[in-house]
Structures are given as C-alpha cells and as structure tokens.
Image: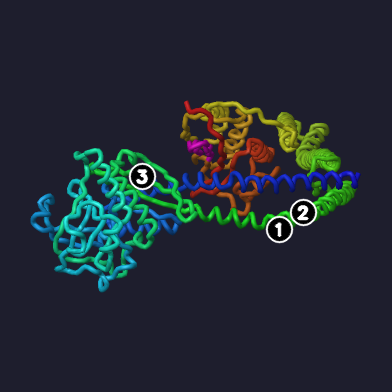
C-alpha cells in the first residue's frame, strides 16, 4: 500500500506541477500583459477620481495643487497635471514673457500687455534667467493662435528674424534659415497650425472658432523659474503630449471629443503608454482638463525577464517535483506513526491527543475512525465518571441525612423517654396534661425535622429540576405575609412592606418557601416592638427581594455560616425552639437551583437577607 500511495502521489504531484508551470507560461505569454493594462487603467481611473476630489478642494492654492501632482507621481508613478480650456497649464505661471503689443497688433486684445506662456515652447531645463535670448526692451514677433481672449504662441523670435510679409506657418526652409538663439517654437502646434491654414485656404473656411495670427511688441518682463519650478516642467515627453492635446483642442475643434473621461493608447520609442483625459466642470461654467500619462514599460520588462529565465524555472520545477515526491512519501509514514502513538494513549485511557486528518485516502479514513472511537470512549467514560460522582454525592447526602437526623433526634427522644417514664411511674400525676403536651410538641418537632431533612436531601441530590413560571412577586410576598400574620401578632413586631408590582420568572412555590423561611427567621430574631421591612427593588433586568429585621447583628465571621444546616449562632441570634435549623439551608439550595445571586449582610441596626430574580413582563 505504501508503494502504491507513493507512486500515486508522485504522478499527481508531477502532473500538478507541470500543469501549474504550463498555466504560468501561457498566462504570462497571452493574458498577463492585457490583464495588467486593463488593471492599470482601472487603477488610474480611480486615482484620477481621487485626484479630482482633492484638486477641487485646493484649486485656489497653486502650491497645494503642485504638491498633489508630486504626490500623484510618487504614489502611482504616473504624471498628472491640470489644463485650462485652451490647453495651457493651470498651476504653472512662473515661466512666461510679458509683452506690450504694438498699437496696431493689440487692437484685438482687451489689454495690450499680454503674458506669453513659455512652458509650451521650450524646456525649462534649457533656459535660465542669464541665458534667456529675450530681455526687457527687446522687440519680438510672435506666431500664435487666438481664441476668445486667449493667445497661445507656437513661434516666438526677435523682430526681423521672420521673413517680411509671412503669415501663417513657415516652410521648413524658412524655419531653418531663422532658427537660432533668438528663436523658440512649439513644433507640434506649429505643424498643426500649418495644416489648419492649408485646410482653410483650400476649403475657404473663414468662419472658425480660432484664428492664427502674428503680433509684434516689446518685451516688458521675462519670468524664469529660480530653481523652484513646477514639478511638471521636468518631463519633456509629457509636455510634448500636452502640446499635442492643446493643438487638437484649439485647431481641430476637439472639445466635444473630450467631454467625458477618455483613455488613449500612445507609443513612443517602442514604449507603450496610456493617456487619460478627464474634463472637470468649474463653478464658473468653464472646463478644466485633468491630463495624465502612465507607462506600461514595467510589465514589458518583467515579462521579458521571466521569459529569459524560463529555462532555469523549468529545471528548478523538475527538481522541486522530486523533492515534493520524497516529502509526500515521508508524509504518508508520519500519520501511521502518529496513529500508533495515539492508540497507545487510548489504551492507557488518555484521550487528549487526536490523529491529524491530512488526507482522504485509506489513512485518512483510519485516522477519522480512530478519532471517532477516542471521542466515543472519552464521552462514555466521562459520563460514567459523572454518574459515579453523582452516586457518591447521593451517598454523602444519605450519610449526612442519617447523621443529622440521629443528632437532631437524640434530644427530643430523650425528652420523650423522660416524659414517658414519669407518666409510667405516676410521678407528678397532677401534671399529666403538661407531659402529654410536651410529648406532642416533641413529636411535632420531629415530624418537621424529618420533612425538612428529606426536602434538603432532595435539593442537594443534584437530580431535582425546578419548573419555572411567571408570577407577580408582590402577590407572592403578600400571600406569605398573610400566612404568617398570626406569628407576627404573637411576637408583637411591626412589619412594613414596600413592593413593586412586577412579574418574575421562577418556581413560585419554592420562592414562597424561601420568603417564608426569611420572614420566619426575621420574626424569631426580632425583639418585641421592633420592625421587619419587606421590600422589592426593581432593576433593569432583575428584581431584588429584601427582608430586613431590626435588632441584634450577626458577627461578621459568622455571616457565611448561617446557611449551614443546624447552625447555631451566638446567644443573641440563638434559634427559637420552634426552628429545625434547616430553613436557611433549604432556602440556599432553592436559590442556587434558580441560579440567582443571594446573600446576607448587617445593616445599621439589623440584618438584611436578600436575593435576586429575573424579571418577566412588567404589568
């Protein structure tokens, strides 16, 4: 059997490992790239949604928005920025040239002084304040696109650099002749502007939303970042993509194309990118675009590296198969040894250990059956021990009962024997009625004692079950008080009650017996003209029943002993001759069978007995 199981495990392990290896190879080859790209898109969408929320909260704070862009790159390794409706960077206003337009060129602008953003024309790393080709007072010409009040440049150079009379896009030869230190251009926008002009000339479309124009003016100020430029300036290819989007937005009337969250594929130098554009409606009615790009190059590199190591992986897996087969063959032997150890312990009646269920084959079935046998034997032996313990308890109860009865009957039997001898000898014949009354009292005491002993033995046997019902505790107390009213009057004590009308869950006859024992005990130990107070205190889920008698206290070291059978305290609390010494012991057992809290304590001028009952429904 051992060889058969080892061969089976070896074949199954080999097939499983080869299947897993094949699944990995196929998955990485066919599905992983696509899964990664889709998952990346979904993650980026969620990230951009989160960025949008934080942007809307901080859009008036340029530094806070730039910090959000930095955090976005650090967290997601993706670039993100915000653009206005014309495709200009919204939160990068520290890189521009301020120009005062000539009077003739400035007629179409509300203000002749305009700020020309340079972030779309030149890389900020290539320009400093010292090597900027433009300086205040220089005369420059600007080719740009005007839409509304916005003017977006795509060529800027020193006046006189451009051929006279040119308008629109310069030809490549013209560009080559004018490029120099005093020449900057946005090649993407310049190309789009040329195509747009050619298209309008061919079709005669003169009524468009944008216009291409050239203006001239004088440089008033040049603003170049002083080492604290916006984070987004530092990535040239990302700015190139922003320029392409701006060109579409201005010259292709593409705003309708970007009226919802859009995702585009883009590839450059063999690297694939995902481009995200999400429009955000501003409160002013304008539109802000969240523009983001993320590279898919990491997954390509990872997949290529894994493919290069496929040979090593296959060799490693084959070695792993051999090791796993050996491991499983050993694993088969271990349960057998464990079964042997466990059965030996079961033979010694030690059921603390179980056989681990590690398989569903023959060994697994054997382990399961041994565990079942162990549980069955353990439960039966435990039940037998409980029965023996219960029998011992009953035997002890019987012995205590016999001992108690023998002890408690000794005195009344002696008294009865004396009375019978006196009556038999005819001594004091004039007191015959007295001795007969004494005999009757002793017989009555013996009857009460035997009844109480039998009842106490029944409660202590552990076999008695309390039947619970719902009743009014105030009515039960009043019923007990009426039954004991003659004893109250005979002892000349005053009883006061303060009872809440509330229902409890308990065994009514037994609870009445407890109250009777408490009140009877209080009557016996309350001096004449003193008070007994019976009260209930309603709490959230329980009711506290209290019986307090005024008079002598119980010594603190004796408080726990008064629940013992045949207890006799000090002379001030000595039991009345009518008592059997079992009342409080019976009350204790009844309350414990109800599983409730009870106790006794000294008050300022007396003793308080109390117990709790669970509430039923309040009337």
Name the chief secondary structure element in magenta.
strand
Residue sitting at x 58%, y 34%: 515
CB-based contact (under 8 Å), mark 3 and mark 2: no
Identify the mark nearer the N-term, 3 or 1: 3
3D distance between C-alphas at marks 3 and 1: 45 Å
Residue sitting at x 25%, y 46%: 197
- The residue that disc 1 covers is 312
CB-based contact (under 8 Å), mark 3 and mark 1: no
Q: Mark 3: few, some, or many residues within 10 Å (few <14, many ≥20)?
A: many
Choose between 618 and 239: the one closer to the eye. Answer: 239
- The residue that disc 3 covers is 278
Identify the mark nearer the N-term, 1 or 2: 1
- The residue that disc 2 covers is 318
Question: Does residue 547 appear anywhere in the picture?
Answer: yes
Q: Find residue 488 and report its image quarter.
A: top right
**Where residue 587 sits in the image (x, y, percent)?**
64, 37
Choose between 12 and 478: the one closer to the eye. Answer: 12
**Where residue 338 sits in the image (x, y, percent)?**
85, 50
Q: Which residues are magenta?
A: 532-547
CB-based contact (under 8 Å), mark 1 and mark 2: no
3D distance between C-alphas at marks 1 and 2: 10 Å
Q: Mark 1: few, some, or many residues within 10 Å (few <14, many ≥20)?
A: few
Residue sitting at x 76%, y 55%: 320
Nearer mark to the viewer, of 1 and 2: 1
**Where residue 224 sits in the image (x, y, percent)?**
26, 67
Residue sitting at x 26%, y 60%: 118
Residue 535 covered by magenta stretch: yes
């Amino acid at each position: 059997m051992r060889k058969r199981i080892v061969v089976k495990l070896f074949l199954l392990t080999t097939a499983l490992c080869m299947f897993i290896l094949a699944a990995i190879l196929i998955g990485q080859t066919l599905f992983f790239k696509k899964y990664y790209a889709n998952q990346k898109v979904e993650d980026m969408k969620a990230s951009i949604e989160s960025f949008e929320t934080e942007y809307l909260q901080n859009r008036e704070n340029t530094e806070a928005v730039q910090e959000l862009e930095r955090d976005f790159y650090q967290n997601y390794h993706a670039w993100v920025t915000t653009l206005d409706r014309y495709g200009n960077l919204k939160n990068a206003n520290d890189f521009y040239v301020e120009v005062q337009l000539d009077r003739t060129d400035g007629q179409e602008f509300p203000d002749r002084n305009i700020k020309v953003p340079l972030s779309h024309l030149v890389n900020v790393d290539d320009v400093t304040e010292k090597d900027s080709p433009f300086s205040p007072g220089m005369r420059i010409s600007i080719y740009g696109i005007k839409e509304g009040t916005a003017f977006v440049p795509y060529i800027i150079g020193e006046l006189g650099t451009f051929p006279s009379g040119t308008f629109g896009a310069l030809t490549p030869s013209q560009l080559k002749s004018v490029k120099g230190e005093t020449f900057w251009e946005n090649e993407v926008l310049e190309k789009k502007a040329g195509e747009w002009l050619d298209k309008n000339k061919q079709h005669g479309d003169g009524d468009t939303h944008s216009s291409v124009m050239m203006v001239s003016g004088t440089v008033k100020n040049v603003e170049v970042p002083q080492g604290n430029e916006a984070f987004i300036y530092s990535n040239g290819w990302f700015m190139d993509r922003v320029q392409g989007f701006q060109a579409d937005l201005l010259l292709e009337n593409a705003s309708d194309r970007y009226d919802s969250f859009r995702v585009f594929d883009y590839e450059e130098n063999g690297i694939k990118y995902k481009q995200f554009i999400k429009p955000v409606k501003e409160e002013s009615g304008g539109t802000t675009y969240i523009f983001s790009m993320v590279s898919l190059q990491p997954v390509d590199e990872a997949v290529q590296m894994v493919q290069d190591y496929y040979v090593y992986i296959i060799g490693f897996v084959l070695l792993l198969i051999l090791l796993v087969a050996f491991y499983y063959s050993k694993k088969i032997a271990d349960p057998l040894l464990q079964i042997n150890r466990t059965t030996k312990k079961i033979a010694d009646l030690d059921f603390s250990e179980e056989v681990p269920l590690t398989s569903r084959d023959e060994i697994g079935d054997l382990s399961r059956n041994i565990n079942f046998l162990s549980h069955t034997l353990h439960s039966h032996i435990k039940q037998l021990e409980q029965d023996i313990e219960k029998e011992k308890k009953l035997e002890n109860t019987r012995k205590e009962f016999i001992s108690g009865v023998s002890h408690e009957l000794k005195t009344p039997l002696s008294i009865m024997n004396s009375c019978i001898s006196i009556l038999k000898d005819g001594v004091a014949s004039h007191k015959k009625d007295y001795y007969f009354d004494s005999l009757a009292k002793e017989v009555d005491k013996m009857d009460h004692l035997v009844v109480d002993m039998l009842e106490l033995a029944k409660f202590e046997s552990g076999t008695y079950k309390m039947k619970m019902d719902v009743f009014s505790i105030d009515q039960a107390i009043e019923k007990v008080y009426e039954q004991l009213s003659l004893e109250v009057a005979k002892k000349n004590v005053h009883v006061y009650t303060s009872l809440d009308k509330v229902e409890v869950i308990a065994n009514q006859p037994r609870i009445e017996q407890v109250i009777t024992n408490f009140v009877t005990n209080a009557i016996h130990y309350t001096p004449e003209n003193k008070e007994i107070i019976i009260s209930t205190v309603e709490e959230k889920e329980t009711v506290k029943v209290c019986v307090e008698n005024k008079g002598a206290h119980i010594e603190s070291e004796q408080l726990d002993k008064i629940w013992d059978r045949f207890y006799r305290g000090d002379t001030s609390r000595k039991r009345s001759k009518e008592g059997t010494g079992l009342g409080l012991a019976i009350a204790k057992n009844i309350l414990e069978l109800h599983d409730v809290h009870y106790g006794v304590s000294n008050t300022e001028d007396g003793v308080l007995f109390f117990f709790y009952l669970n509430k039923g429904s309040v009337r």
